[in-house]
């Protein structure tokens, strides 16, 4: 026959075992619940990202379709005018110049799309060389100034040399110049500057457009991202130019930022390490 002390000890042991099991079950249940919640958050976040990417890709396709149709329609109209009407030499040259401008737009668009595909597929192999960045920027500004007369000013320090892929950096500069043309009114200037220190070369493309809201400044370098919606947007573009420019600059161990211009517009600034 058990004594009261033995009975109490047995009851205490049972209570202790019950408490331990209860704590264990609660701990396991809480851990399982946390794992489920974390999984739900991950799935939900992934789902939202897929929706956002799908929306951006849809906007990209709409933008590409518009970007392709617009210059093709313009060139077709100019060529039909040349074919059907007797024009003066000045009028003919003006229409031919418009066709060349539109074909350049198409070429830039195709280059961006092809280059983006090659970068994403890791198919592009950079060709690294040391070259004169000052001359490259001067040539790029001169090319755009011939397309858009009386719109560009430049202040370029001569003899600045860097090491990198010349084709990639040329595309980055062209994208910024094209972007400035899109957003700057035709009666206002676009400035391109190049300064250099012992360590870095700094390129600035300065426009006088409407500027970029602070909340958009980081997003504009995302793939396919464009300010506004396709239904309300009036500017041209596909959302690839700034994305590619950012990629190219980062691959060259540089950085790109966007700042406000005064009284209006934006300043895109690229900083690249110079060659010793």
Image (cartoon, rainbow, N blue to C red):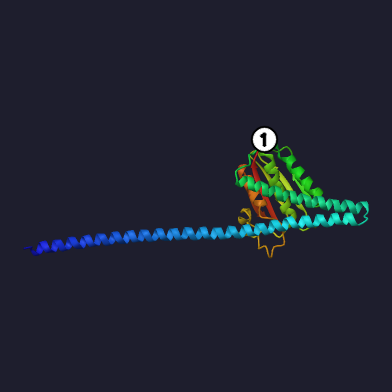
| Number of residues whose C-alpha sits closer than 10 Å to that of mark 1, classed few (under 14), some (14–19) or many (20 or more) | few
Residue 37, position in %: x, y? 42, 61
* Image label count: 1
Question: Residue 244's spot in the image, x, y percent?
Answer: 65, 49
Would residue 188 be seen by someone viewing this image from the given angle? no
Q: Of 71 and 275, which appears nearest the observer?
A: 71
192 or 79: which is nearer to us? 79
Which quadrant does the C terminus fall into? top right
The residue depicted at 73 percent of the width and 43 percent of the height is 137
Is the residue 17 above or below the residue 123 in the image? below
Residue 120 appears in the figure: yes
Residue at image location 68% in from the left, 35% down from the top: 130
Residue closer to the observer: 213 or 60: 60
Secondary structure of the residue carrying tag 1 is strand
Counting from the top left corner in percent of width and height, residue 156 is at: 74, 43
Please identify the quadrant where the N terminus is shown: bottom left
Q: Residue 169 at what x, y percent from top left? A: 68, 43
Measuring 62% from the left and 53% from the top, which residue is drawn there? 223
Up the image or down, 246 lies above or below 264; here it is: above
> What residue did someone put label 1 on?
129
Up-down relation of residue 108 to residue 50 (above or below): above
Quarter of the rendering containing residue 134: top right
């Amino acid at each position: 026959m058990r004594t009261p002390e033995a009975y109490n000890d047995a009851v205490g042991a049972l209570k202790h075992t019950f408490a331990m099991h209860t704590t264990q079950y609660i701990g396991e249940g809480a851990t399982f619940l946390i794992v489920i919640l974390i999984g739900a958050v991950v799935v939900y976040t992934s789902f939202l990202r897929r929706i956002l990417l799908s929306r951006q890709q849809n906007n990209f396709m709409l933008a590409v379709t518009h970007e392709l149709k617009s210059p093709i329609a313009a060139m077709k109209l100019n060529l039909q005018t040349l074919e059907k009407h007797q024009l003066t030499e000045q009028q003919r040259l003006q229409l031919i110049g418009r066709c060349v401008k539109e074909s350049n737009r198409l070429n830039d668009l195709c280059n961006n799309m092809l280059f983006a595909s090659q970068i994403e597929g890791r198919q592009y192999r950079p060709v690294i060389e040391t070259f004169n960045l000052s001359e490259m920027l001067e040539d790029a500004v001169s090319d755009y100034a011939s397309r858009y007369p009386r719109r560009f000013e430049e202040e370029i320090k001569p003899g600045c040399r860097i090491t990198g892929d010349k084709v990639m950096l040329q595309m980055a500069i062209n994208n910024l110049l094209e972007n400035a043309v899109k957003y700057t009114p035709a009666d206002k200037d676009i400035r391109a500057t190049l300064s250099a220190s012992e360590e870095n070369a700094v390129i600035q493309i300065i426009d006088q457009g409407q500027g970029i809201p602070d909340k958009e400044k980081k997003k504009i370098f995302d793939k396919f991202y464009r300010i506004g919606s396709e239904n309300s947007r009036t500017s041209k573009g596909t959302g690839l130019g700034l994305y590619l420019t950012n990629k190219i600059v980062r691959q060259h161990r540089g950085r790109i930022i966007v700042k406000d211009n005064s009284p209006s517009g934006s300043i895109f600034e690229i900083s690249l390490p110079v060659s010793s």
